[in-house]
Image: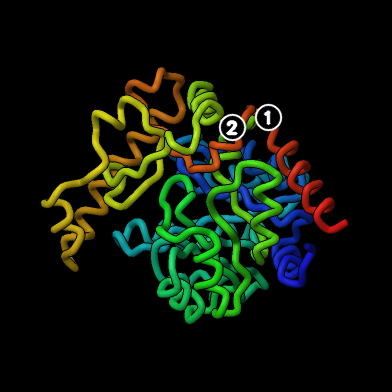
Amino acid sequence: MNTAIQQRFLLQTGTTVPLICGPMYPCSNPELVAAVSAAGGIGIVQPISLTYVHGHDYREGLRLIKALSGGRPFGFNALVEKSSRVYEERMIRWVDIALEEGVRFFITSLGNPRWVVEKAHAVGGVVYHDVVNRRWGEKGRDAGVDGLIAVNNRAGGHLGDRDPRALLDELAPLGLPLVAAGGVGDAGEFAQMLGLGYAAVQCGTRFIATTECKSGASYKQAIVAAKERDIVSTERLSGVPVAVINTPYIQRLGTNIGWFWRWMFRGRKTKHWARTYFGLIGLWRLKRDQQRSGSGKNELWQAGRSVETIDAVVPAGEIVDGFAAALRSADS
């Protein structure tokens, strides 16, 4: 199963296991990012988590991850949506500092990644772009990205509407390496995704339930206890579907945004106001709820359908090692 497309991903990222710990707000603390990279996968920095949630100076946070990982490669998530000039300028500066600090793998989301591609390629870097369908895959390809993160309908957080096989079939003709994002909670599912033809796998929910992740103990135990049927999709967090655990809080909050906000999101100008409103409210809710230990009555906990096969809180390195063993077994 160690295919040419997997080898291409390993060479692009400098990893030994085709596994990404996806960027997560607010769960991507430096210790988690570093632990995945140290074990042979690649952890991804979510910059707002690094600075706003976990309180690190941005450059010093990158240096901390480098030290904790033993100098192993890690990546950076650039959200390239044009929401405000202040935000855009801050993201450009963050990318520049990441490049100065030696980061060479970037995952772009929510906009045109061309400017990140140009900066990364100028120093030999690599850019993968989050997509949920072929239309956005074509936009990423045309912007010059090196690969695509194929976000399927089993993902936690923001999710797509295609199953992993259908999304692979839709994106494969674009000729870029594809990373399966969503639905992988154990080593068997990891090997299965690679067997379909994906170059690598990105996990989020699985890495929340780890000893290095600084999310609250109740959140981690909720992931362990949850089954696939406990995952629902809500628009009330960001205005677009987000996969969460169906806690009493979600049941009270509801899952639909209503006609007014749907009208706002359809307008060329008003959609930016709507995104800003939901973005600020969502950031506050997630920072409040996913770091503390509550009962679920008043918490909002993101998670994907991979909860079905997650049965324990374990070290991140143990997950990477187990996935690597599954891949070796499939190759033998």
Mark number, residue 314: 1
Distance from disc 2 to disc 1, alpha carbons, whole Å, reads 7 Å
What type is the residue that disc 2 sits on? Ala
Mark number, residue 159: none
Task: State the residue position of label 2.
Answer: 209
Residue at x 73%, y 65% (from the top left corner):
6
Which quadrant, please, contains the C terminus?
bottom right
What kind of element bears circle 2? Answer: loop
Residue, far right = 332
Residue, far left = 260
Report the side of 30 relative to 89 (left or right): right
Question: Residue 168, can we see it?
Answer: yes
Residue at x 16%, y 52% (from the top left corner):
261
Question: Residue 114, can we see it?
Answer: no
Residue at x 26%, y 46% (from the top left corner):
278
**Label pair 2/1, CB-CB below 8 angstroms:** yes
What type is the residue that disc 1 sits on? Val
Crowd rating for badge 2 (residues with CA inside 10 Å; few <14, some 14–19, many 20+): many
What kind of element bears circle 1? Answer: loop
